[in-house]
Image (cartoon, rainbow, N blue to C red):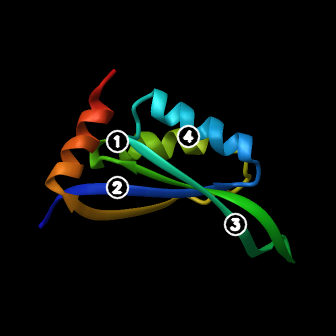
Amino acid sequence: MLSKKIISILTSVDQAEQAKWMSQELLKKRFAACIQQTSGISTYHWQGELECTQEYYLHIKTTPDLKEQVITWLEQHHPYEIPEIVVLEGACSKAYGAWLSEETLKI
């Protein structure tokens, strides 16, 4: 049964090292318990042109209490002029929710 709230924040960058740095910094600050990094091709409109680029996606898992801190951190440190910051609110198992809370509270 899913009963604990979880926040998933999605973003992307075009450099693997930037994605790694962002993940490590968010984890060091305990703003997230886990960040999955994947890569793929993004196709999108930008400044009147159709773009197709390699990007690195971050799936940041955090608690509802830390959502605004993660968003603020991303807005301050993201390299893009208009960063993708997508927030998904959901539910997770009690055990995963407890782990998530425990890992984000350690300072």
Relative height, residue 46 to residue 103 (above, below): below
Q: Residue at x 55, y 31 (%)?
A: 25
**Circle 1 residue:** 66
Relative height, residue 73 to residue 92 (above, below): above
Real-space CA distance between mark 4 and mark 2, rounded to the nearest whole angstrom:
16 Å
Instruction: Using a 10 Å C-alpha cutoff, classify the residue at mark 1 as few (fewer than 14 neighbours), some (14 to 19) or many (20 or more).
Output: some
Q: Which of the two marks, 1 or 4, is nearer to us in this view?
A: 4
Q: Residue at x 75, y 76 (%)?
A: 43
Q: Give the residue type at disc 1.
A: Leu
Q: Which of the two marks, 3 or 1, is nearer to us in this view?
A: 3
Is label 1 in contact with label 4 (beta carbons under 8 Å)? no
**Circle 2 residue:** 7
Q: Give the residue type at disc 3.
A: Gly
**Circle 4 residue:** 23
Give the numbered dot on residue 78.
none
**Circle 3 residue:** 40
Instruction: Using a 10 Å C-alpha cutoff, classify the residue at mark 3 as few (fewer than 14 neighbours), some (14 to 19) or many (20 or more).
Output: few
- In terms of depth relative to the viewer, which is nearer, 59 or 45? 59
Dot 3 or dot 1: first in sequence order is 3
Q: Give the residue type at disc 2.
A: Ile
Q: Position of residue 88 (x, y in %)?
A: 39, 64
Real-space CA distance between mark 3 and mark 1, rounded to the nearest whole angstrom:
28 Å
Does the rendering let one see residue 77? no
- In terms of depth relative to the viewer, which is nearer, 2 or 12? 2
Real-space CA distance between mark 1 and mark 2, rounded to the nearest whole angstrom:
9 Å
